[in-house]
Image (cartoon, rainbow, N blue to C red):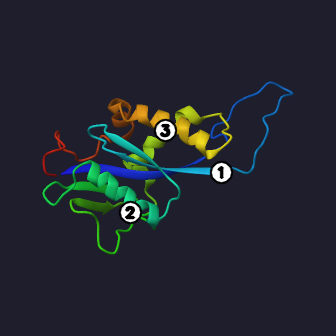
């Protein structure tokens, strides 16, 4: 069984960090942003990750995204993938159930500190800090390039998402 932890984030086209400026220069305020939504699937033990931009954070977007994720890992009745989800209302299986081989465990309410995927956002925010984007397409391009690079870097993913107390085996192909 393979353990993965999905999570989602909303990225604005406006700045997400704060920066000091010299007096009398002030940073322009743009109170209206457009948004880009991103799902992340991380395996804390191996550092494997997949980042998927989506148009919205809803059941309608979540279900096909998790199905595509399970298919990309070869989820089937004899090869199980365990997703550790937070309690978001849209984390519900379709009426026909999850795809074969995909199992879920829901964390207690209001417990983002135990969701490994939650800590991946520190990594995805890095290229966006203190930048404004003209459009969601420009934001998606910058974030897409960064996430593609992150998917090739298992060490930072593991360092940010593998909790010392997490009861994982030493081999993710073993049954848990």
The residue at the point 68 percent across, 40 percent down is 134
Viewed as shown, does residue 141 lie left or right of 44?
A: right
- The mark found on residue 63 in the picture is 2
Which label's residue is closer to the chain start, 1 or 2? 1
- Counting from the top left corner in percent of width and height, residue 43 is at 30, 44
CA–CA distance in space, label 1 to label 3: 17 Å
How crowded pointer 2 is (Cα within 10 Å; few <14, some 14-19, many 20+) is rated as some
- State yes or no: discs 1 and 2 in contact (Cβ < 8 Å): no
- The residue that disc 3 covers is 144
Asked which secondary structure carries label 3, the reply is: helix
In primary-sequence order, the first of circles 1 and 3 is 1
Counting labels gives 3
Residue at the extreme bottom: 95
Instruction: Report whether 112 appears left or right of 176.
Output: right
Task: Measure how far apart labels 2 and 3 are at the Cα level.
Answer: 21 Å
The answer to whether residue 85 is seen in the rendering is no
Please tell me the numbered disc located at residue 101.
none
Evaluate whether residue 144 shows in this view: yes
> Label 1: few (<14), some or many (≥20) within 10 Å?
some
- The residue closer to the viewer here, 29 or 161, is 29
**Seen from this angle, which residue lies furthest front?**
137
Q: Nearer the viewer, residue 53 or 5?
A: 53
Residue on which disc 1 sits: 34
> Residue at point 52% right, 38% down?
143
The secondary structure type at the circle numbered 2 is helix
Name the N-terminal-most of marks 2 and 3. Answer: 2
Check if mark 2's residue and mark 3's residue have beta carbons within 8 Å. Answer: no
Q: Secondary structure at mark 1?
A: loop
Residue 51: x, y in percent?
42, 44
State the residue in front, 22 or 135.
Answer: 135
């Amino acid at each position: 069984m393979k353990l993965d932890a999905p999570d989602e984030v909303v990225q604005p086209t406006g700045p997400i960090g704060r920066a000091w400026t010299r007096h009398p220069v002030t940073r322009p305020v743009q109170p209206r942003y457009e948004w880009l939504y991103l799902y992340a699937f991380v395996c804390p033990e191996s550092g494997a990750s997949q980042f998927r931009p989506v148009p919205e954070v809803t059941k309608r977007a979540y279900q096909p995204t998790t199905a595509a994720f399970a298919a990309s890992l070869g989820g089937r009745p004899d090869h199980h993938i365990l997703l550790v989800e937070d309690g978001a209302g849209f984390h519900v299986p379709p009426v026909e159930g999850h795809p074969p081989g995909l199992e879920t465990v829901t964390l207690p309410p209001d417990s983002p500190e135990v969701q490994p995927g939650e800590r991946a956002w520190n990594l995805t925010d890095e290229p966006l800090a203190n930048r404004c984007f003209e459009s969601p397409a420009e934001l998606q391009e910058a974030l897409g390039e960064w996430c593609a690079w992150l998917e090739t870097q298992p060490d930072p993913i593991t360092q940010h998402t593998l909790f010392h107390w997490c009861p994982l085996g030493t081999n993710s192909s073993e049954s848990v």
